[in-house]
Image (cartoon, rainbow, N blue to C red):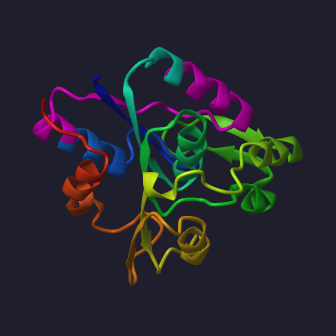
Amino acid sequence: MSTVVVYLHGFQSSPQSEKAQQTLAYLSRHHPDIDVHIPQLAPYPEVVKAQLLQLVGSLNGQELRFIGSSMGGFLSTWLVEQFGGKAVLINPAVRPFELFKDYLGEHENPYTGERFTLQEAHIDQLKAMYCETLQTPSRYKVLLQTGDETLDYRQAQEKYQGGELIIEQGGDHSFQDYARHLPDIMAFLEVTND
């Protein structure tokens, strides 16, 4: 069975983000046979959900491996709990619906220029995707930096107990020096050259 790696970016980000591009470059160099998907995620939860269900459906029969940053970590968790596989989460959003209250209104994605408006209904849609408890915490490796200015790393530390936690002092929400973790990330995800 072949392995596929799906990288899910954060809120208001894109496949052009630095970590997404570093991941793609690393896989291209070291694991050129691995199928990689880095979709541009829609800003609305119900649309993202449909996007991801369609993507997973198209990958039928492959070993699912996810890398999720921030909101992408929340989405990766939802996918693993639904479909299995393994995930590496980078400064993941644990309960993003709590944060969305501060983001209601109009936004523009700095990468794509797409304008969108967040409403109360989107908070409820995110809540519906929340996984209260993890079926198999060992399916997760979580990279956290205590200097994350957007999310409280302790929420993820608590949520993913039983998984493999890497907690670095300092840093920020973007997770500084991400690229040096890529060999360990791929080892955890069991990405190997056939």
**63 vs 141: above or below:** above
User: x%, y% of residue 41?
Assistant: 55, 34
- The residue at the far bottom in this view is 169
Q: Identify the image quadrant of residue 194.
A: top left
Front residue of 45 and 118: 45
| Region of the chain picked out in magenta, as a range | 27-55
Front residue of 73 and 13: 73
User: x%, y% of residue 74?
Assistant: 59, 51
At 17% from the left and 26% from the top, the residue drawn is: 33
Front residue of 189 and 68: 189
| Picture quarter with the N terminus | top left
From the viewer's perspective, tell me whether residue 58 is left or right of residue 128: left
User: x%, y% of residue 70?
Assistant: 53, 56
From the viewer's perspective, tell me whether residue 89 is left or right of residue 98: left
At 60% from the left and 66% from the top, the residue drawn is: 159
- The residue at the far right in this view is 120
Q: Identify the image quadrant of residue 133.
A: bottom right
**143 vs 131: above or below:** below
